Amino acid sequence: MCDLKICAARPFFFYCVISSLLPLHRQKKNPFTINTANKCTTHLEADMAEIKSWVFWRAVGAEFVGMLLFIFIGLSSIIGRSEKDQVPQELKVSLAFALAIATLAQSLGHVSGAHLNPAVSLGLLVCCQISALKCVFYILAQMLGAVAASAIVNGLRKSESLGVNQLSPGVTLEKGFIIEFLTTLQLVLCVIAVTDKRRRDVTGSAPLAIGLSVGLGHFAAISFTGCGINPARSFGPALIRNDMKNHWLYWLAPMCGGIAAALLYDFLLYPRINNLRRRK
Amino acid sequence: MCDLKICAARPFFFYCVISSLLPLHRQKKNPFTINTANKCTTHLEADMAEIKSWVFWRAVGAEFVGMLLFIFIGLSSIIGRSEKDQVPQELKVSLAFALAIATLAQSLGHVSGAHLNPAVSLGLLVCCQISALKCVFYILAQMLGAVAASAIVNGLRKSESLGVNQLSPGVTLEKGFIIEFLTTLQLVLCVIAVTDKRRRDVTGSAPLAIGLSVGLGHFAAISFTGCGINPARSFGPALIRNDMKNHWLYWLAPMCGGIAAALLYDFLLYPRINNLRRRK
Amino acid sequence: MCDLKICAARPFFFYCVISSLLPLHRQKKNPFTINTANKCTTHLEADMAEIKSWVFWRAVGAEFVGMLLFIFIGLSSIIGRSEKDQVPQELKVSLAFALAIATLAQSLGHVSGAHLNPAVSLGLLVCCQISALKCVFYILAQMLGAVAASAIVNGLRKSESLGVNQLSPGVTLEKGFIIEFLTTLQLVLCVIAVTDKRRRDVTGSAPLAIGLSVGLGHFAAISFTGCGINPARSFGPALIRNDMKNHWLYWLAPMCGGIAAALLYDFLLYPRINNLRRRK
Amino acid sequence: MCDLKICAARPFFFYCVISSLLPLHRQKKNPFTINTANKCTTHLEADMAEIKSWVFWRAVGAEFVGMLLFIFIGLSSIIGRSEKDQVPQELKVSLAFALAIATLAQSLGHVSGAHLNPAVSLGLLVCCQISALKCVFYILAQMLGAVAASAIVNGLRKSESLGVNQLSPGVTLEKGFIIEFLTTLQLVLCVIAVTDKRRRDVTGSAPLAIGLSVGLGHFAAISFTGCGINPARSFGPALIRNDMKNHWLYWLAPMCGGIAAALLYDFLLYPRINNLRRRK
């Protein structure tokens, strides 16, 4: 499902994580060279080659278009009726977000991987399945798409909420963090697991599986935090409505969840070098 | 999923689009000849050969039968209960339309492609996956099927609405256009993407993916426009009830959305000649 | 999905249909012999060989077990809450029946074909995919399973309805017939289409497709007729509650729908000898 | 989907069942040796080899993580809104449990088999698809995960119920047993059937099929018993809230259902040695 650029070897994993945290200009000067069978040259050159290609910008464009459609549909389903705090509305919104991801991942997955979620992009970076540069551009495109869609929906109906994520009454920051962390963890775990190229047993539709995982997160979290699990989705309406209360939480918790899922899957549950390490 | 007749080459694309806009008699006289490897002769002769075949008329018949069942089921689910403006009813109607397309595309996809939607037929024409003649006959069969089903359901219960698509209070023509345009765009994008024969990564059920995309459109649009995204579905009840208010919008917006999806996918996101153009 | 016994040749189709309508003893005396390449001997001998095999009785047993679980789950979901005439209840019941068929067809499909519906068995007989003898025994097993499950659920809670199918107020016999006929037609069409061994394009889960088709029928019909589309499902509660009002309709309409679907698919839409007949 | 350790031969089946009921130290001393083609040595040595491997402990860890996420999401969806005894809430909870199993079975199925249910583990033991030792450790990990998740959710909101399974008013112990027994039977039947390696006809997503089967059980049982069908899921909240009323029923009925499903499938419906036994 992903346009992958797998890291050369496990020792470079930590380099990969660290370099992703460094500013971009730093990375470009990095003279470190990987000479392995899969013919990467340097991160610098590889990134430069990548950024010059049509495929890269098409993928970034697909993330923008996908995010625009995703947020447009999600917010439209939220503001359609004003019966906000009721179970049927929760069902409708959860299913709308689930089917939106399932559909768009099916439509755009072969172009960009259809992350449509900064936490997913970050998780895949930690798994070394995308480059740091791609991760950054994807997240920017996702944020831009979410803001554009929020502006469109804001023009449609002067609704109270526009689906801005807020903590429900009685939900403290710690509780909100736990909920957003665990629901994002299961989502990114699902994304990494179904797109794992080592597996041969993923027989059904990967986009549908990921979409249902998004719906699942909404069933669990929607009554407590409105269900972010996607920083860009939280960012769009918050910026348009200029309602940034606790907004940092909707970035921190999903990003931590995405990183935790990647580490959990890639190191503990299904390590890449398990062929060497396991006895049996 | 489609009984395709792929256009010979990219340069003929514009010819293909233009000829589809010309009156039919014009096309028959067109002496233009395509002599390529895949042995098309002239559009005229190809169309004539196609229209004489049993396969063609079976496909047109399948579109009629499919549309009749689709609209019968959709409208029956709408008028079953009179709790019109409530979320559970929206859920029921969205799921009914979604499952109807998923089921009928599964049952009839190998016969006609199961477009069941003029916007889909038009989008596939723009992608050069069906001939202009087939597009015209499909749309006629779809309209006929929708009218027949609407007449049957109209006889079942003298309901107020019969599911005639109308703009909700507060939704202007511009807003309605945007909503119908974007929701149809995601639907036709999904149809084109999952039936793209160049892809090898569509592992699940394509009919189910398309059905869920239809449901998704309903979740987003049903509170605003009643959710057309299918001109024939809008046409049937409108004709039977003779309620043509704003009816042109339910043709214009989905048709534009279908064309936009085809151009977006086929030129920008996943161009057919990307093997040549891309560097990497 | 089916344990098929395909008829030898098309000319014997009508014999096959007719013999299925004759009493069973008549069939046994039938001396007619089919000597074709696929080594059928006589219907009589073939049926006798079939009825003596473990596989046959295992399949009949699977139909009984499947029907018992199906009706138990369906009726339990109906009588769980008494909010009978509301949309959320319709959603719950529709999804319960849909998922029950999807699950049981997945669990038992390789044993018996998991028809779980006399209309499906009859449709597959008309398509010559099962023998008349198997059709009769399947229908008997289905009725027995439905009665057993209805008796169990009847003991659970002294509910008013036990899910006995009745025409809603304002729905005449003719309207009820049309609704049951068309909803069963789409179901049997789906079953025949997804289990058609000539197709190579059924990529997703056939049991899920059939289950969703059952759910679809419920969305359309549940407000009007309670949604039979399955004579055995109607028969169980009606017998236990001794409420046989209009019961014949719930046999006639689905059976006609099943036959119509088989004829429509097998003769018009996707005829078996289309390789010979079609030009192109 | 499962990390199987198939028993050597059918005669050892009863040994396998019996040894699983004996205390663990007894099993270790068992000198019985299986010398067959598939190179098992003794149960003792095989179990010891298994327990020393990383793969085994990774699988146990995956059951713990999966159960923690499963119960966290399930209970969060239950306590999100307090509209407890209504149909929309039943829909939400049923779908949440269904999608949770579908997602986690997709994410963790290749690591541990993703049983996430003691009744499933026991059923697979009776089918000789996992060792007795694995079954015991899986059940312990599942219970631990469920307790941990219940403690987390208990901290989130001081809700009345925390989703503790209780019999609804009017539901006696016998009725509750029948409902839990039959709904678990269909679930374990589905698990065994879709993971049966002898089948070649399971084309869709096995995790989704199992998830929908869990949802199906909820549609049937939720109004009567709150829907256990999973002893560990019942155990977690009951322990945290110290509400053990009728708790034994939520262990006995699902466990009996799991064993019954395994025996029904493996001996009656699709016996392993049917190639020998059947005539035809």
Image (tube, coloured by chain):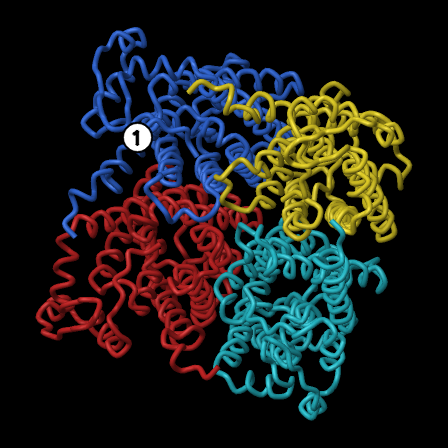
Chain colours: A blue, B yellow, C cyan, D red
Q: Nearer the viewer, residue B220 or C192?
A: C192
Percent position of residue C30, x then y: 70, 90
Subunit under mark 1:
A
**Which amino acid type corresponds to the residue marked 1 in the rendered image?**
Cys
Percent position of residue C88, x then y: 63, 49
Q: Nearer the viewer, residue C82 or C264?
A: C264
Percent position of residue A112, x then y: 46, 26
Look at 46% across and 64% down and name the residue there.
D186
Residue neighbourhood size for the residue with mark 1, other residues' Cα within 10 Å, grouped as few (<14), some (14–19), many (≥20): many
Percent position of residue D243, x then y: 33, 55
Give the total of numbered labels.
1
Residue B7's place in the image compared with D216, above or below, is: above
Look at 20% across and 62% down and name the residue there.
D133
Quick one: quadrant of the N terminus of chain B? top right
Q: Nearer the viewer, residue B55 or A135?
A: B55
Is B38 left or right of D203, judged from the image as shown?
right
Is C185 left or right of A208, judged from the image as shown?
right
Quick one: quadrant of the C terminus of chain B? top left
Q: Answer yes or no: is residue B81 visible.
A: no
Determine which quarter of the picture holds residue A152. Answer: top right
Q: Answer yes or no: is residue C102 visible.
A: yes
Q: Nearer the viewer, residue D14 or A186?
A: D14
Look at 55% across and 24% down and name the residue there.
B273
- Which residue position is annotated with label 1? A127
Is A270 left or right of A210, judged from the image as shown?
left
